[in-house]
Amino acid sequence: MGIRPTKNSYTKLRLILGDQLNYEHSWFQLKEEDTLYVIMEMRQETDYVKHHVQKIIAFFASMYNFSHWLKKRGHHLLYLQINDPENQQDLLKNLELIADRYDVKVVEYLLPDEYRLDRQLSDWAGSTSYQVRAFDTEHFYTNREDLAALFKGKKQYLMERFYRDIRQKHRIMLDADGNPWGGKWNFDAENRKPFKSKSFVPPPVYFSRDHADILEEIEKAGVQYFGTPALDAFPWPVSRRQCLALLDYFIEHHLDQFGLYQDAMHKEYWNLFHSRLSFAMNSKMLSPKLVIDRVIRAHQANPDRYDLAQVEGFVRQIIGWREYMRGVYWAQMPGYSSLNYFDHDRALPAWFWTGETKMNCLRYSISQSLDRAYAHHIQRLMVIGNFALLAGIDPTALDAWYLGVYIDAIEWVEITNTRGMSQYADGGIVGTKPYVSSANYIHKMSNYCEGCAYDRNERVGPKACPFNSLYWRFYEVNRALLEKNPRIGMAYVTLNKMGVSDKEAMMAQAQSYLDSIEDL
Ligand code: FAD
Ligand code: SF4
């Protein structure tokens, strides 16, 4: 059942998109009798790529809970469900229909974070007879344009510089003289440990509400999806209360080891010490400020347990990487979505949709993604993304996969991470060099290589780990684009020292793997 308003006409309509569920927004602090809030489930949003079913359920459930919260606070609301016979399944058609029906004069919306929605609404605003006004979502620390302004005239934007700027502006973890706590801005070097099963990993928290009714509606509407719905133990928070519970659970159980094992991967622990707060934040149910404030408070209350290295590592992900990626997106769109520095065009192997590959690291990381709509950063970057880059997968196909699979994937943060950080398709705007590795790194940071059908120590031969020969082939075929990069020098020193026959054997091995990529 949807929610219908009680009056027949409203002067003002306020649109709330599915990822704009900001419980703290100033809009909702005052009750306005003549304002109609509108929230809509739409095929336009479920179908722009094929999505993981947990992602569709999580968004619909969160939108529905948010609308109930609004209603309880006395706001007037129209919640349009996916199977409502009047639903046009298109943002602008629905908007016009509702505005017309309720005799609306003014339409207000919150600035979308996605370029496609931003254009759709701003183009409409320029052509419609309604008075249209756009407002900030009051979610981020920075404005869309801040990053471009800071790096005006530069080709590359350095995350570290942006991060320090935000910490200074918002006085985050600074002493009275403006110096960073602990005398350093960045404790990254202390945060790169592999996890060797020595410490106990507290299990992830689940939320038990049964979402069978939402799944039924999604199926009735004919929305195409993949993945398992996890109805019995849904892992994603879909209300403010659940988001806050997840944050508390993270602080109580995982934060103290977060930084230490941030880059580690393990077959038995799918989220190790990661927070899984990305969905809560990207849907805006939790603000980054609230998350950061609570984490810093935990450190201040108990610095022995929550040491500065763990806390700074976490804070940097959110006010560093997260805000930075958003800044890059708005500085670079729309061109960013078609950048392809290496001209990669290989099709995505079919096993990306099943996880059925003999490569253990990819089997675990992809199967986990398909089961749980989640992989942590290093699985996304150094296993799945690493392989895709070494194999020369078309970044557009890869973007569509990441955008559909992950619970937190919204284009502003997905594309900058996938096309930018992981695929270096932007030629070095986000990263100073491509994130690629041979089996060495994966073995060092995980236990995936144990029991793998391939041998991590071999470069050639029937059992040789594909990452090894593909790694060297990547540098060889991209010599003209990469050799002059000062951060890559060592790879070319090694490659140049390699004997001709060794090199030829390895290139042939890599090519044969690429020719039979579906069978790897
Ligand atoms: P934690 O490890 O607990 O980190 C805490 C928070 O820091 C995250 O919730 C997130 O909000 C933020 N964060 C950490 N790293 C990044 C980053 N690189 N960029 C932006 N925010 C970051 N993140 C998304 O939110 N949506 C995506 O679609 C997405 N796609 C990615 C694709 C690739 C190829 C890569 C390499 C990374 C991607 N990330 C994406 C970033 C990161 O992997 C996820 O934010 C993180 O894994 C979410 O899990 P978590 O909440 O447990 O994170
Ligand atoms: Fe992955 Fe190679 Fe290790 Fe197998 S041996 S898990 S393919 S890195």
Image (cartoon, rainbow, N blue to C red):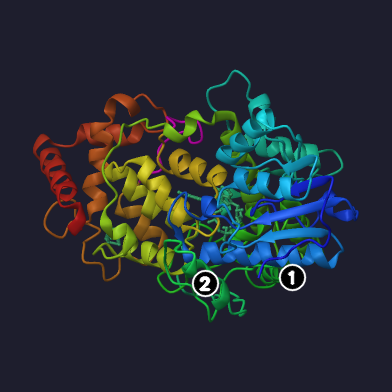
Dot 1 or dot 2: first in sequence order is 2
- Compared with 55, 434 (above or below) is above
| Residue at image coords 63%, 21% | 152
Could you tell me if the residues under marks 1 and 2 are in contact, i.e. CB atoms within 8 Å?
Answer: no
Q: In this view, does 243 lie to the left or right of 215?
A: right
Characterize the local packing of mark 1: few (<14), some (14-19) or many (20 or more) Cα atoms within 10 angstroms.
few
Q: What element carries label 1?
A: helix
- Compared with 195, 384 (above or below) is above
Circle 1 sits on which residue? 241
Q: Where is residue 119 in the image (x, y as percent from the top left)?
A: 60, 34
Q: What span is colored magenta in the figure?
A: 426-436
Relative depth, front residue between 498 and 436: 436
Characterize the local packing of mark 2: few (<14), some (14-19) or many (20 or more) Cα atoms within 10 angstroms.
some
Q: How many marks?
A: 2
| Residue at image coords 66%, 29% | 127
In the rendered image, is residue 276 in sight? no
| Residue at image coords 72%, 45% | 100
- Compared with 477, 206 (above or below) is below
Instruction: Give the quadrant of the N terminus.
Output: bottom right
Q: What element carries label 2?
A: helix
Which mark identifies residue 215? 2
Relative depth, front residue between 26 and 247: 26
Q: Is residue 119 magenta?
A: no
Instruction: Give the quadrant of the C terminus.
Output: bottom left
